[in-house]
Each structure stands twice: as structure tokens, then as C-alpha cells.
Amino acid sequence: MQSKKMSHRFTIVTVVSLLCLALLAACAPAATPADSGQPADTAAADTSDLTGRELALATASEEDRTLIVAVSQDLSTLDWDASGAFPRMTETQVNVLGSWAQPAIIELEDGSMVGDALNFEPMLADTMVISMDGTQWTFQLPEGMKHYPSGNEITANDYLYYKDRRGNMRVPPSLDRLVRLATEEEPLKGFEVLDDYTFRFNASDWTPILRPFMSCCQFGYLIDSQAYMDAGEAEGDKWGQEYAKTNMPSSGPYYIHDRIPNELMEFRTNPNWQGKEPFFNRILFTVVPESADRVLLLKAGEVDMAQDLSAKEINDLRDDASVSIKQVRIGDMIVMPINHNTEPFNDKRVRQAVSYLMPYDDIINNVWFGSAERSFGPVPAMVHGYDHSYWPYDLPQEEALAKAKELLAEAGYADGLEFDLNIDLGTPEQASMAKIIQSALAAADITVNINPMPRAAYQEGKNQGTHTSALDTLFPWTAEPGYFMDILLGCASYGNRYSGVCLEEADAVIREAGTTVDEDARFALYSEAQRLHIDNASWIWLGARYFNLAIGSDIAGYVAFPDTRTRYWHLYRDDSK
């Protein structure tokens, strides 16, 4: 197969800006000793004992070590607490910011590698100690690690600043959500900095969510607190909010070297990074708004990875020998959040009626092309502890229509109703789903006004809770039933802000389950919470999609992490493929 070299990429003219090309040209291979007048080595290094990533790293040219990723959009800001581009932001974070720990990597029988959600290993920490009862977690940093570019030392206080900054910015800190879930005491014993290099998380009770949550990337970022505080000092802003819009100091494997808004973001390896040396020392995220163009660039070898492709495009690429599709069966919920604070969805009978009318199988079969499966409640089948036995909404078509009309009449909508369905222009499947839903609900005299929105406006509607209804894909990163329901449907959750959903009875059951040690008893409680939400038709659960990523077939080392965010420092180019 033809190797993807930088020289092949200079043909991107109509899609990638000339400025991007200039940056690519500026990264031409370094001069050889003969070119520079320096003496050449008398003998090449012996690589006979090296294999895989180590061999690739030892023999790669500089042009091999640049990875080009075609993305659909840029970030509007580098401040994670103000960004609406969630997947792009969190992928940037996991590559730029170091955390205490990371999911442990395991190799499956088929040779693929995954990050284990139930086990984790140190990242910036060099030691971790867990108490026998599982309620006390102590992390210790090595001395002398530095942020880039400031050179400020990385300390335990950097995490405390990160957590407090998130709270100040009105973004619920993930562990604060865990605190609420685990016990009625709020907060728990909390977060404790023992010294400059030692941090302890104290839980007042054991909870099954703690272990998978600790491996989540957002648990323990250590950010350059001094840089943020110094930048905001003149304005009296200890959180450095203006500075954060255009700066993200690095404590992880990469730093943001350059950024041209809406065109290009360039990452380079962090010179202060003390972990495994990344094979790719330069990563270019180039903005290619049209997914069809991203596909063409990937097939032509002009980019190494194409993000945000539609399910149909992924399906069409499966037989292309130059492309590798990485598919992970995760619980990424395909949902229709409905606003409990506005008519008509403030009436449970209307929510139930719409649930009966949904063409679930048509959506999965005709929109997702093998990249999704049905889901029958708030917890998908990928998550241990799901219970779909309470699902009542799959009836023969005529029976479902009659039941829906009966419920609508009881709610005072015998002559039908009308509502807006907002969709994200950046997610092509949403338009297809919306049309199928619009047609199906028309049979019950329900008029669905499809409202396509630019992603920024769509995200703003989510954050402000102004959508009457919407289509979305939402993925809680901790694969545990209570966490899924708490974060999406709890009364003090993201989902409540999104759609006003609040079912206090279910919240109480989930809270009890969160500290129930006996597994059978815990999952019985989770089943009851699922029954309550299904009966309440808290949202419309359409299915669960898989994570798909299209990359060049010469890119190896991919690890499927629980949060689906690519850690680029694990990847390498294998020209033997």
C-alpha cells in the first residue's frame, strides 16, 4: 500500500486553506548531515530487536511523525468551562492536560487495545493508595514536573484550583456529582491537599461508581493554576477567564503550538512531558466543514483521520483497503430530550403518547446503518445492570396509534398538537431522524416543526434549557446504571438543566443504590429506578450508537478508551501495513 507522506498532501487546495499548506510546508523534513555540512554518522542504529511502535519510532522520518486530522469544526474558545463543542474540547483536554490517573490499557484476544473503565493506572501521579474500605484515595506527584510554557511546578493545589474553578463557572464538577450520588451528606469529607505533592479524596461511604469514575479523564486534571491567576490578577479575576479563551497551558503529552480560528489547530509534543514519548510529535487539526470532503481527503491519503462522519459514510468506508474503521460498542444514547417545563411535554400523557408513536426500528435501520442498536429505557444494553423488561412502547402500529390518541385526548389534545424539534446542523443523522419522526407523528395529528440550528446556537439552547424538544446523542462516561440516570435525568443534573426533568422518587432510589454493597440488591434498586423513568417517559430513548472513527490503515496503536476520546500519544505510523 502507498505510504501517506507529507508530499502527497500538498494537493489539498479547495478544502484546506493555503495558510494551512504553508504551515505544512514549513514542517518539511529536517536537513540531512550532508545538506548542513555536518559529519554523517558512520553507522546506522541497530533496530533488529525492535518491533511495532518502538521500531516505527526508531526509523521514522520527521514527515512520518506528523498526523493530520480532518475535523468538522473549531473550538470557539479554549476555556473548557465555556465551550459548547463538547467532543472537540474534551479530546483537546485529554491530550493537553495531564491528570492523576488514566484507564489501564489491556489487550483483547483479537489484538485490539482498550482502556479498562474499572481499573486505572497513574498518569502524572507516581503512587496511588486506596484504603481497604475503598473510601480514601491518595495520589502523590513526583517533585519537579513542570507546566508548559510557564515552567511553573505541577502541584496538588493545581487540581484543587481546577475543581474550584469549575464550581465557580457554574459547571458541576464531576466528583461533586458523585458526592451527591453517594450519600445524603453533601459534600462528603471532600477533597484534601496534604502537601504540595499529595492529594486525597475522602468519601464518607463506599460507592460502586467510584472506581470507574476515578479512571475518567475529567476526574483529575492538573492545570497551571498560577498562570491563570497571574493572567487575571489585573482585572481581579482569579479564574483568568479572559486568558482562558486563547490559552490552555500544558501538563500533558502535547501543547497547543498554534491556532488559526476556524482553520487549523497545531499540537506539538510538550518538552516538559516525562511520560512515554509520543510517536507523532506534531498533530494538525484542520477544519473541513463538509463530511463528504473529509471522506475524500481520507481516501486520497491527504489526511490520516476523519472525524464526525455520518453512519452511512462510515458504512461505505468499511470495504476501503486504505481506511481502517475503529468501532466500539458503547452506551452513547440516541435520545429525544423533551422539555418538562413547557407545553405540551409538561404532561406525562403527551410524553407517553409520543413514546408509543416513535418509529424506533425505522430510525435504527435506515439512519444508523449498523452503527447503533435499540435501547429500551434510560440504561443501554452495553451497561451492566440495564433492565428493559418494563418497556411498554413497542406495540403493533395500529395498536400504538390508538393508545397514543387515547392518551392525547385525555391530556386535552384530541385534535392534535404542534411542537418544535430542534436539531444540530453538525450531526447529519439528526435531519434524517427528524424527518422519520415527523412523518410517523403526523398519523396522530401531531405537527413536528423541524428547526435545524447551527451547532453553537443548538448547544446554547441545551445549556439554557430552551429547546421544547431536540435530538441528541449523549454518553455518560462512567458505565454504571446509577450514573447514567443521575447525570442525564437527576433533579440536580445536566439533564435537568437541559430539559427540566426531575423525578424525585427515582433520585431517592438511585441514591440508596449508590451505597448498597450487595450487588443483587443494588441492581434491584437500579431496575426500580429504570421502571420509574420509563413509566414517566422522562425522555424518548431511540437507541444507542456505537463510536466509529475512520483512520488511515497505516495508523497503528489505537486504544479505545471508555470516553471515546483519542489519546494521540499512543498512535504511530506503521508503513508495513
Image (tube, grey):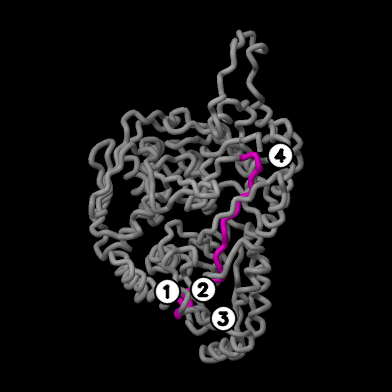
Disc 2/disc 4 C-alpha distance (Å):
41 Å
State whether residue 72 appears in this view. Answer: no
The residue tagged 2 is 376
Disc 4/disc 3 C-alpha distance (Å):
46 Å
| Residue closer to the observer: 542 or 41 | 41
Question: Residue at left 64%, top 74%?
Answer: 437
Given contact means CB atoms under 8 Å apart, are the residues at marks 3 and 1 in contact?
Answer: no
Task: Label 2: state its secondary structure.
Answer: loop
**Sequence order check: which comes first, mark 2 or mark 3?**
2
Disc 2/disc 3 C-alpha distance (Å):
9 Å
**Sequence order check: which comes first, mark 4 or mark 1?**
4
The residue tagged 4 is 302
Q: Amino acid at mark 4?
A: Glu
**Sequence order check: which comes first, mark 2 or mark 4?**
4
Residue 552 belongs to magenta span: yes
| Residue closer to the observer: 250 or 476 | 476
Disc 3/disc 1 C-alpha distance (Å):
17 Å
Q: Position of residue 395 (x, y in %)?
A: 58, 84
Given contact means CB atoms under 8 Å apart, are the residues at marks 1 and 2 in contact?
Answer: no
- Nearest-to-viewer mark from 4 and 3: 3
* Boundaries of the magenta span: 534-555
**Sequence order check: which comes first, mark 4 or mark 3?**
4
- Choose top left, top right, bottom left or bottom right for residue 422: bottom right
Locate the C terminus and report the quarter of the image it occupies.
Answer: top right
Label of residue 333 in the image:
none
The residue tagged 1 is 530
The residue tagged 3 is 394
